[in-house]
């Protein structure tokens, strides 16, 4: 889905009432099939209709604009989420003394490692600290350069072309 900015061109023509309803329903739960059904499309074809509608650029723009309006109304933004995650990390990483029912300390402390790890993981993902990279090596364990990868792709394309030609030849022979 694309993000909305004011500089985007307006739709070539306004959305139909049914498509506007689809956008409104889609913004409820982000489920294209259910949105199509609630907007009045046939349940039998709702999955295909929802998928097709979500590829329409005008609908994508309307959904992006609607999501932006929803976020502004609820005052949710990246800073709010990150502040919440930071608070979770700080709370989870506190060593909290265990107390008895009467409030006296036992000398033991509780630490919520799982909560802290999850919050830190989400923050790290947002900051793209954990991007996985695949290193492709040759038989000797040496990294393949972009030239070697290009050669490999050329070879794979050649194999695919030969298979396509062989399949086409089989079709011609069967058609005789």
Image (tube, helix red, strand yellow):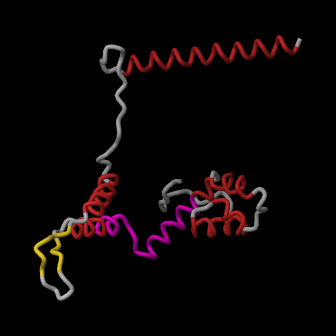
Reply above or below: 97 against 37: below
Is 65 within the magenta? yes
Overall secondary structure of the magenta section: helix
Could you tell me if residue 43 is visible in this image?
yes
- Residue sitting at x 67%, y 67%: 20
- Residue sitting at x 47%, y 60%: 5
In the image: residue 86, left or right of residue 95? right
Closer to the camera in the image, 12 or 56? 56
Reply above or below: 74 against 2: below
Is 64 within the magenta? yes
**x, y percentage for residue 166?**
70, 13
Q: Quadrant of the C terminus?
A: top right
Reply above or below: 84 against 1: below
**x, y percentage for residue 36?**
70, 63
- Residue sitting at x 72%, y 69%: 17
Closer to the camera in the image, 94 or 124? 94
- The residue at the far bottom in this view is 102
- Residue stretch in magenta: 61-83
Could you tell me if residue 15 is visible in this image?
no
**How many numbered dots are placed on residues in this image?**
0
**x, y percentage for residue 22?**
67, 65
């Amino acid at each position: 889905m694309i993000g909305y900015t004011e500089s985007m061109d307006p739709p070539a023509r306004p959305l139909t009432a049914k498509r506007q309803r689809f956008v409104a329903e889609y913004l409820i739960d982000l489920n294209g099939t259910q949105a199509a059904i609630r907007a009045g499309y046939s349940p039998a074809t709702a999955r295909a209709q929802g998928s097709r509608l979500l590829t329409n650029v005008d609908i994508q723009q309307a959904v992006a604009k609607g999501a932006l309006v929803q976020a502004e109304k609820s005052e949710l933004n990246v800073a709010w989420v990150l502040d919440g995650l930071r608070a979770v990390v700080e709370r989870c990483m506190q060593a909290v003394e265990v107390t008895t029912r009467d409030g006296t300390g036992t000398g033991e402390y509780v630490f919520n490692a799982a909560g802290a790890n999850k919050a830190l993981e989400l923050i790290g993902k947002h900051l793209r600290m954990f991007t996985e990279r695949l290193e492709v090596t040759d038989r000797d364990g040496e990294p393949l350069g972009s030239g070697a990868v290009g050669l490999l792709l050329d070879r794979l394309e050649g194999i695919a072309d030969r298979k396509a030609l062989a399949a086409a030849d089989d079709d011609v022979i069967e058609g005789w």
